[in-house]
Amino acid sequence: MLSISRLKALSLCYYFSDLKLRQQKGSSTVITLGQAQGGTKRFEEALKTLPGLRDLSINGLSIELKTDSDMTAMAVRLLVNKGADIVSVNRNDYQLDDI
């Protein structure tokens, strides 16, 4: 049986491992749009202003963002303000197996 202090130590170890992983890998978000009348160029230009953007790829109505930290809310806000219809948003959440 694990003691409370051992559980706390393991919890802190997991927290810092997760933090280190997020700093190394950053965050990945896939946003799927509804119909994009007029194309996705205006969305691409808006998303390029995100701080910490590492990579941006658009494949049809699917946009993948790789950023230094989680910018999901800001990205969705930018897209909606540009007239995008958001169908789904999927963030890459790291699992214990990824550490």
Image (cartoon, rainbow, N blue to C red):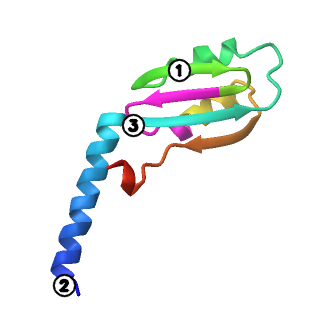
Quarter of the picture holding the N terminus: bottom left
Three-letter amino acid code of the residue under disc 1: Leu
Query: Residue placed at 49% from the left, 35% from the top?
Result: 28
Tell me which amino acid carries mark 2. Ser
Q: Is residue 71 left or right of residue 57?
A: left
Q: Residue at x 60, y 43 (%)?
A: 90
Q: Which mark is residue 46?
A: none
Q: Secondary structure at mark 2?
A: loop
Is residue 70 highlighted in magenta? Answer: yes
Which of 44/81 is in front? 44
Give whichever of discs 1 and 2 has the lower sequence position.
Answer: 2
N-terminal-most mark, 3 or 2 = 2
Q: Residues within 10 Å of mark 2 (few under 14, many from 20)?
A: few
Find disc 2 in the rendering and name its residue: 3
Badge nearest the viewer, 3 or 2: 2
Task: Give the residue number, with chain letter if any, for mark 1.
Answer: 56
Q: Position of residue 73 (x, y in %)?
A: 55, 40
- Toward the front, the furthest residue is 97
